[in-house]
Amino acid sequence: MKSPFEGQLVRLRAREVDDLDRYHRWLNDPEVTQHVMMRYPISVAFERNYLESVAPTSFELALFSMDTLAGEHIGWCGLHGSSPEDRSASLGIAIGEKSYWNGGYGTDAMRVLCRFGFEHMNLHRIELNVFDDNPRAQRVYEKIGFKVEGCRREADYRYGRHRDIVVMGLLRGELVEESRPSGAAS
Amino acid sequence: MESPFEGRLIRLRAREPEDEPLSYQWFNDPEVTEFLTLRYPLSHKSQREFIDSHSLPSYANASFAILRKADGAYIGGCDLGDNRPENRQASLGIAIGDKASWDGGYGTDAMRVLCRFGFEHMNLHRIELEVYAGNERARHVYEKVGFQVEARRRQAHFKYGKYMDVYLMGLLEGELLSD
């Protein structure tokens, strides 16, 4: 049986207090946080307390640490704000380890996370927000099936300017799985 | 000097405990809640607690009762919440609970007063709101005061046995249309 937490490149798992040093480093790296809803520095104490106090992974808050299949912790992702009546959730994701950018890890993690949301949490809709100056992420989201549903004009302010926030949504059945190499046996 | 809380037809004031009996009636009336996020019945306790926690209007939660100017009757409520000082953005919510006041221009007037207050006194840059597909009357009011449809969140809300799209609308500083 295939694990619901494993893709072709990454594996999702619960967050551990042992992840502290990496989260502290990533969440204080402007190259990482410029694309995330984070503005102020995060202290080690705050992040430790957060990791220690966070509730078990659940429908309400399904947050994961993201490892390579070799076991290196490279980022995080999760589904939050879930509504059981609407069967909808909001998605967040980031690769904190910059040497893994552009390697397909985010795309793979997105597929694993969305598949988990639909097939195990029984969601109907997953949505996300992406800043207008992050076309790379937007391309990844489109590749796996997310559709641009609109744009919240000047909804964010950082780095001295108002940024638009693009709203994207993925409905059950719209997730695009990876294409297999031609000629490969399925 | 013109009061920032007064429009042509309505006036805004802080919520008071005596608003409870009427608002309890309104927000248990499916005709009123059809297009609101409310889904479950409201108890007197929950309504009292809502009023208690929303009766000190402030930047974090600018919540108001709407009164009809002609006779001072309490007819609804509105608020600017989720305010982010860095983004200078707020989310707007409004309901006219008194059905006799529907289609009388009170909601439009309250929207103008609330948005003007948000821009001119809270120094907001952007106000946003959500409205369900099917609530054409409300969307028309929002467009009339200057809100633009910015996104259509497909099948984002489930009620009465079906999924509905949700429109996200935004209004920036300088876009508010006066009557």
Image (spheres, grey):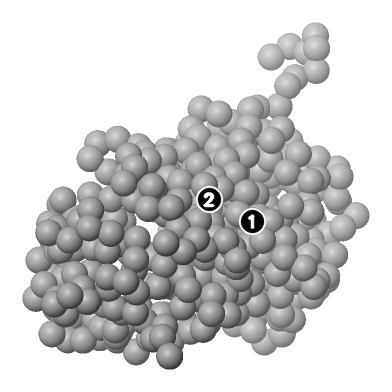
Quarter of the view holding residue B19: bottom left
| Residue carrying label 1 | A153
Residue A104 appears in the picture as rendered: yes
Q: Label 1: chain? A: A
- Number of numbered discs on residues: 2
Q: Is residue B130 left or right of residue A51?
A: left
SS of the residue at dot 2? strand
Q: Are marks 1 and 2 in contact (CB under 8 Å)?
A: yes
Label number found at residue B148: 2
Q: Nearer the viewer, residue B135 or A51?
A: B135
SS of the residue at dot 1? strand
Q: Which percent across, then down, holds residue A107?
A: 73, 40
Quarter of the view holding residue B88: bottom right
Amino acid carrying label 1: it is Arg
Amino acid carrying label 2: it is Gln
At x 37%, y 53%, the residue is B141
Q: Is residue A31 left or right of residue A129?
A: right
Instruction: Point out the image quarter for the N terminus of chain A.
Output: top right
Q: Label 2: chain? A: B
At x 90%, y 55%, the residue is A99
Instruction: Point out the image quarter for the C terminus of chain A.
Output: top right
Q: Nearer the viewer, residue A41 or B99?
A: B99
